[in-house]
Amino acid sequence: MDGLDVDFSNIVVNRANIKNSKNDCLDLSFGQYILKKINLSGCGDKGLSVGEKSFVELDYIKIKNSNIGIASKDSSITKLKNANLENLKICVTAYNKKQEFDGGFLEIRNMECKNYFHKTDSDIASKIIIENEL
């Protein structure tokens, strides 16, 4: 089960702390989301999962002890100002999962990722831009 699963919404979240979710900590689909400060840890799969034509603007996210930090997929656009990531298999990923959609787009202004196996992973239909790595 996801910690917080939000679909078909247009919302602003000022602050969220989600710990020890068995699947994704924060799963956003089919909407527009503005997130201010997000802390996620112990996520069974993804810290932040953005999918199905979603648009996300995020000021700050901290993700620790998860499989994947941030995933932008299936025609979604994810724009982050600051990402602090730690103890992950994959820091960030963008991909196409469902055939009715295109790839994902992920743009990060400042990213710090510590203790990981792969920093980025994307497919040919997707794009990841990281401006500054700390």
Image: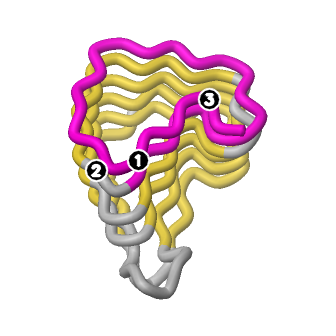
Q: Pick the residue in front: 52 or 91.
A: 52
- At label 2, counting other C-alpha atoms closer than 10 Å, the crowd grade (few under 14, some 14-19, many 20 or more) is some
Q: Is residue 83 visible?
A: yes
Q: Are marks 2 and 1 in contact (CB under 8 Å)?
A: yes
Amino acid type of disc 3?
Answer: Gly
Instruction: Give SS at disc 2.
Output: loop
Asked whether the residues under the numbered discs 3 and 1 touch, taking CB atoms below 8 Å apart as contact, a structural biologist would say no
Q: What label sits on residue 64 in the rendered view?
A: none
Query: Which residue matches tag 2?
Result: 31
Residue 49: give x, y in percent of width and height: 50, 48
Please state the horizontal and vertical placement of residue 31, each as a whole percent of the image: 28, 50
Type of amino acid at the residue the image marks with label 2: Gly
Decide which of 131, 63 is in the foreground and name it. 63
Label 1 sits on what residue type? Answer: Asp
**Residue at the image point whose x is 49% and y is 87% from the top:** 99
Query: Quick one: SS at disc 3?
Result: loop
Splitting the image into 4 quarters, where does residue 100 fall? bottom left
Left or right: 98, with 126 as reference point: right
**Against 109, is 104 above or below?**
below
For the point 39% across and 35% down, the residue is 111
Between discs 2 and 3, the one toward the N terminus: 3
The stretch in magenta equals 1-29
- Which residue, given by chain and number where applicable, does mark 3 sit on? 3
User: What x and y, as percent, mark residue 30?
Assistant: 34, 56
Q: Could you say which quadrant of the image residue 115 lies in?
A: top right
- Main secondary structure found in the magenta portion: strand
Give the x, y percent position of residue 108: 30, 44
Per the model, the C-alpha gap separating discs 3 and 1 is 13 Å
Gap in angstroms between the C-alphas marked 2 and 1 = 6 Å
What label does residue 7 carry, if any? 1
Front: mark 3 or 1: 1
